[in-house]
Amino acid sequence: MAGVRLDHVSKRFGNTEVIRNIELDVADGEFLVFVGPSGCGKSTILRLIAGLEEVTSGAIWIGDKDVTHLPPSKRGVSMVFQSYALYPHMDAYKNIAFGLQMSSRSDESVDQRVRRVAAMLQIGDLLHRKPRELSGGQRQRVAIARAIVREPQVFLFDEPLSNLDAALRAQTRLEIARLHDELKATMIYVTHDQLEAMTLADRIVLLNGGRIEQAGKPIELYRRPQTRFVAEFIGSPRMNILPVTMEAGLAILPSGDRVPIPSRFDGPADLGIRPENISLATPEVPETIHARVLHVEELGDTRIIHAALSDGTALAVRHPADAPAPRKGDEVALRLDPEHMHLFGRDGARLD
Amino acid sequence: MKRVLSRIGLAGACIVLAIFLLFPLYYAVLTSFKSGSALFRVDYWPTEIDLSSYIRIWQEQPFARNILNSIFVATTVVILSLGLALTAAYALGRVQFRGRKFLLYTILGVSMFPQVAVLSGLFEVIRVFGLYNNLGALVLTYMIFTLPFTVWVLTTFMRDLPVEIEEAAIMDGLSPFVIVTRIFMPLMGPAMVATGLLAFIAAWNEFLFALTFTLSNEQRTVPVAIALITGASEYELPWGNIMAASVIVTVPLIGLVLIFQRRLVAGLTAGAVKG
């Protein structure tokens, strides 16, 4: 087992710089998730670590070895691809075993390892099937088994769940988490789905335009996003962002409403507040703002109320399912919880 | 009504096309069963079954030897072409290097020269290698026209194989040779069968090089041997023998196509990636 270190890694394709000077330490046994919108460079980073792409500058360390110029097979990493990338003409057993067999290990030890890994992933009964005879979830297990059987120091996952349907995705997500507990290996995982990132990661690295926007524990990114970009990316439904003018501890909303906020900043800024930190209040409660309900989304456990302030500014509010829900067109009073407000400057950086 | 008419029209067109394509072959079969003066009578239906032509072609020249020559040349050409084309296709389809496009179009360009244009130059080459009147000369020269299209077809196919399969193989620690032979080759089976078959037919039927680069009856391939079949006297045209020989050499080709046509249907990559 080993950690991974990215030492000022950059990558450009022609004139486009996809990875800009990334510095990152992945601890031994850590589950690290790269997350970001498409085109942010997250897959490229994974391919750089795998050795499928060469870095333009910088160095990559795995354990105490500089692997920057080593071929993929010498790095002690294995990778699970989004499209599974199984060998279509081989059955599941052969798919898992082929790499080992080619590296001239004894057949017996290969067989033992394949059977053990197959049992671990509960695909022991499927070993004689060709990939085309397997369902999506089963193919993904075979692909994961193929990665595990090589006993790598580092596992790389490239959006392994995005081809699965929602139910299977949740289940496989859980299994990957369990696998991580069991193998105690370093895992680096790429996804565009913030939910996967939140649930799986020991640490999330949020990428934007080839740079690290913020790295930290999932709950840190959620509770204290360092930039407006992080604030909007993490959390669903996404955080409300209101353009405000700050004046003596009051945020003046576009609608003219004034909301107290514990900040000494003065001037134009963006106020961020998550839907669960806004609540419906009776109009008599001070410090409320008035809004009209546009639409109510029923989620079962909660409701999302989409409302508009007097000037049309939209706000999403999470409302408990057991409380009486307002209806479309109703006038409501909203209370913004000052404890959970985030203030960002116009450059997107956090202001406290 | 309209549907019925269009169906009749389609069927009619198919029949006309089939007759147009098959009639020469049919007439050859018909003629091969005739002998003597019946050869010069125009019949559209079999009137007699006379196998004497089929017997005579084996007696009057080393026809069996000619067939073996053809089989040897065509098979060797197919094996060499596919082997070279597969490795070339890996380079041209999967490896990035400068001048790749130029190289591809040069290969295509080679196939555009008419055979006659390169004939005299090739003759010198053959002489230098000491391959005159040797089947090796045919194997070598046939690859001039088989390689361009095998390389092109396989390159196109190679490009369409999912890159991730190759990357997975690289991560698995497989060498390029193992990737090409154990992963790509099975996946390209249908394409290899199709191009191999075309190369085989082209080599089997080739006439000009075979005529030019061989001298003795023992080194000839069937097309040349058939063309050089002579009658008992110079006034006799041995139509029966020629037709019988033609039928004999056509049957294996038809057999090959029928055997491999199932394998030509692809679908091997199904299940490799999501889809």
Image (cartoon, helix red, strand yellow):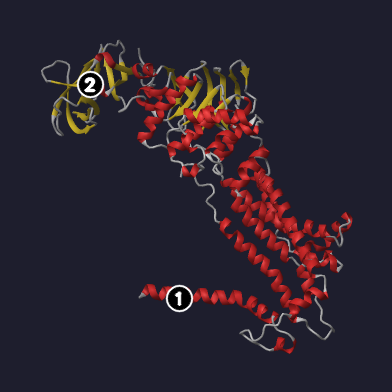
Res A341 quadrant in image: top left
The answer for how far apart the CA atoms under marks 1 and 2 are is 73 Å
Q: Chain of mark 2?
A: A
* A11 to the left or right of A325: right
Q: Amino acid at mark 1?
A: Gly
Q: Are marks 1 and 2 in contact (CB under 8 Å)?
A: no
Q: Nearer the viewer, residue A178 or A293?
A: A178
Hey, which quadrant is residue B204 in on the image?
Answer: bottom right
- Tell me: residue A295, above or below residue A228: below
Residue B87: where, in percent of width, then height? 69, 45
Residue found 41% across the figure and 16% down from its top: A217
Looking at the rendering, in which quadrant would you find the N terminus of chain B?
A: bottom left
The residue lying toward the viewer, choosing from A266 and A81, is A81
Q: Secondary structure at mark 2?
A: strand
Residue at 60% over, 26% down:
A55
Using the rendered image of the protein, determine whether residue A47 is visible from the camera's viewpoint.
no
Q: Position of residue A191 (x, y in %)?
A: 44, 29
Q: Nearer the viewer, mark 1 or mark 2?
A: 1
**Residue in the picture at 62% in, 28% down:** A73
Relative to A160, residue B62 above or below? below
10 Å neighbourhood of mark 1: few (<14), some, or many (≥20)?
few
Q: Chain of mark 1?
A: B
A267 and B14: which one is in front? Answer: B14
Query: Which residue is at a point 86% across and 62% down the rendered structure image?
Result: B133
Q: Which mark is residue A278?
A: 2
Q: Position of residue B231 (x, y in %)?
A: 81, 81
Outermost residue, left side: A284
Q: Which residue is mark 1?
A: B9
Position of A201 relative to B235 (above/below): above
Amino acid type, label 2:
Ile
Task: Say if residue B192 shows up in the picture.
Answer: yes
* Place of residue B162 in the rendered image (x, y in percent of width and height, measured from the top left): 55, 42
